[in-house]
């Protein structure tokens, strides 16, 4: 998978996870609350600027954490909450992400 595709995939997954989190935790049905919108924008910016996109499988698997500490905690909270719920809320996206992440991880192990 090329770098641009990986960036787009990562952005879609993060967007879906933040939207799910916001809807369930903050009751927002028409969009994201200001805090979640800010977190999404921050995550998009970090993904665009990531110099390791070619060699990593996903931000949560990355050994270099480029998020500011407070934003890292927020995204971890979102991922812990939304991760298991993604199978029900967005099953195709969740399964595709899982398969692609495992393929990429295996590929990295074979190369490393």
Image: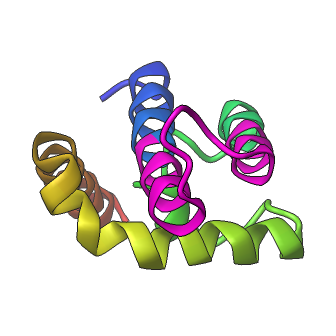
Placement of 7 over or under 97, stated as above or below: above
Residue visible at 42% across and 34% down in the picture? 12
Asked if the magenta segment contains residue 28, the reply would be yes
Residue visible at 24% across and 49% down in the picture? 97
Q: Is residue 9 or residue 64 the one in the foreground?
A: 9
Occupied quadrant, residue 44 = top right
Placement of 50 over or under 1, stated as above or below: below
Total numbered labels placed on residues in the image: 0
Occupied quadrant, residue 16 = top left
Predominant SS along the magenta part: helix
Residue visible at 86% across and 75% down in the picture? 69
Stretch in magenta: 16-42
Residue visible at 71% across and 71% down in the picture? 74
Quarter the N terminus occupies:
top left
Quarter the C terminus occupies:
bottom left
Placement of 58 over or under 5, stated as above or below: below
Left or right of 35 in this view: 22: left
Q: Can residue 102 be seen in the rendering of this structure?
A: no
Residue 67, horizontal then vertical, whole percent: 80, 61
Placement of 73 over or under 61, stated as above or below: below
Left or right of 61 in this view: 51: right
Give the colouring mode of the picture: rainbow
Q: Can residue 5 be seen in the rendering of this structure?
A: yes
Residue 26, horizontal then vertical, whole percent: 60, 62
Residue 95, horizontal then vertical, whole percent: 12, 52
Left or right of 35 in this view: 24: left
Residue 41, horizontal then vertical, whole percent: 75, 36
Asked if the magenta segment contains residue 38, the reply would be yes
């Amino acid at each position: 998978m090329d770098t641009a595709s990986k960036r787009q995939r990562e952005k879609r997954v993060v967007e879906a996870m933040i939207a799910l989190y916001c809807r369930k935790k903050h009751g927002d049905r028409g969009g994201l609350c200001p805090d979640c919108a800010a977190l999404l924008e921050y995550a998009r910016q970090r993904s665009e600027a990531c110099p390791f996109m070619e060699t990593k499988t996903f931000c949560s698997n990355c050994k270099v954490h480029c998020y500011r500490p407070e934003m890292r905690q927020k995204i971890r909270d979102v991922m812990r909450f939304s991760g298991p719920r993604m199978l029900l809320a967005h099953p195709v996206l969740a399964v595709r992400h899982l398969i692609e992440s495992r393929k990429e991880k295996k590929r990295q192990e074979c190369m490393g």
